[in-house]
């Protein structure tokens, strides 16, 4: 019995013997593209010559295919300048060939790490971890993008998150204190950015803008020093800056210094035993001279040499300063600086 012959586009691809008048050819591969398959039988004593009609078979190349789950990520409210807990996306190669990955990236205020490497085998998967770090308050959007050799590249995942922070400002563009000893106030506004809600602590600091160290630098305070802030409900506080007048502190220090020294000298002399006065005449004389020198006996000048009185405290140094007010809540911090002129 002759075998049946099978051809593809006129080229033999194999033979098979008849079984109950049927010939079957099992083949595991065909060229990529359109194949025209036919079968023919030369005939024998039992069967006449026969040939089949052509059967068209289209063979495509084995290719990778990308499936991403989930298709989008939404992050909860996150303080600006901080990093969220990671959320994950699973990448699956649902095709029949290896998936070659060129790059995986996240845009906007988002970042990614992954276990995918440069290739994912057919039927395998890997994990992409995405974090959110808002740079400003409000809704923030981005895209996770995977460039590869699969159809539809790049495949993407939509990313969304909300940033929250605290805003601080002042209606005053600058403060002026006409002379040392005076004070000035300014209104400070605190607001919530994004969907922030919580307790805000307020602090302030004064920095001299000139060279060297100023005398009796201005001091500042805030009332209140703590506020409850929530979205859509701005609050305010009062900043007060005070300076030191010239004179008072140095005069008091000078008086205490001389009075204390004089008293010490008198006490020392007074405690010399009576029976030793004659023998201590010289020492007594020295005590008197010491007391006079300290308290300025003999018309000592108040402006120079010997027991001279030190110059009075000049008060707060005149010039330019900057008053910085800072609002803090947990990891959130915002500040504003107001120019200050002391004249």
Image (spheres, rainbow, N blue to C red):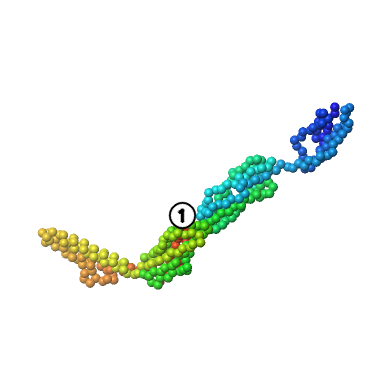
Residue at x-position 63% and y-position 49%:
146
**On screen, residue 180 above or below 162:** below
Residue 134 in picture, x, y percent from top left: 54, 55
Q: Determine whether, in the image, residue 123 is placed left or right of residue 60.
A: left
Which quadrant does the C terminus fall into?
bottom left
Residue 70 in picture, x, y percent from top left: 61, 47
Residue at x-position 77% and y-position 42%:
58
* Nearer to us in this view, 13 or 218: 13
Q: Which residue is mark 1?
A: 330
Residue 279 seen in render? no
**On screen, residue 124 above or below 193:** above
Mark 1 surroundings within 10 Å by alpha-carbon count, few (fewer than 14), some (14 through 19), many (20 or more): few
The answer to which quarter of the image holds residue 245 is: bottom left
Which quadrant does the N terminus fall into?
top right
Residue at x-position 25% and y-position 67%:
307
Residue at x-position 67% and y-position 44%:
65
Residue 13 seen in render? yes
The answer to which quarter of the image holds residue 212 is: bottom left
* Nearer to us in this view, 325 or 314: 325
**On screen, residue 100 above or below 194:** above
């Amino acid at each position: 019995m002759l075998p049946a012959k099978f051809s593809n586009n006129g080229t033999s691809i194999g033979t098979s013997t008849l079984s109950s008048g049927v010939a079957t050819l099992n083949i595991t591969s065909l060229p990529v593209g359109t194949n025209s398959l036919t079968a023919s039988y030369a005939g024998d004593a039992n069967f006449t010559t026969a040939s089949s009609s052509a059967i068209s078979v289209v063979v495509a190349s084995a290719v990778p295919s990308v499936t991403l789950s989930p298709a989008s990520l939404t992050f909860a409210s996150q303080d600006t300048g901080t990093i969220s807990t990671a959320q994950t996306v699973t990448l699956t190669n649902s095709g029949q060939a290896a998936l070659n990955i060129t790059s995986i990236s996240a845009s906007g205020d988002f970042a990614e790490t992954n276990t995918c490497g440069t290739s994912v085998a057919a039927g395998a998967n890997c994990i992409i971890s995405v974090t959110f770090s808002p740079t400003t308050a409000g809704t923030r959007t981005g895209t996770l993008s995977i460039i590869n050799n699969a159809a539809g590249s790049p495949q993407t995942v939509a990313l969304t998150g909300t940033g929250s922070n605290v805003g601080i400002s002042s209606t005053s563009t600058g403060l002026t204190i006409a002379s040392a000893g005076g004070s000035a106030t300014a209104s400070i506004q605190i607001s919530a950015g994004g969907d922030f809600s919580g307790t805000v602590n307020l602090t302030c600091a004064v920095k001299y803008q000139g060279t060297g160290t100023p005398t009796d630098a201005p001091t500042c305070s805030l009332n209140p020093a703590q506020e409850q802030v929530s979205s859509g409900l701005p609050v305010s506080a009062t900043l007060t800056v005070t300076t030191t007048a010239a004179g008072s502190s140095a005069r008091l220090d000078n008086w205490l210094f001389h009075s204390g020294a004089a008293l010490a000298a008198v006490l020392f002399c007074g405690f010399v035993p009576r029976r030793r006065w004659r023998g201590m005449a010289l020492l007594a004389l020295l005590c008197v001279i010491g007391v006079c020198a300290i308290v300025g006996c003999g018309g000592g000048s108040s402006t120079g040499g010997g027991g001279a009185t030190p110059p009075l405290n000049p008060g707060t140094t005149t010039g330019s300063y900057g008053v910085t007010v800072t609002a803090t809540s947990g990891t959130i911090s915002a500040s504003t600086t107001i120019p200050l002129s002391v004249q």
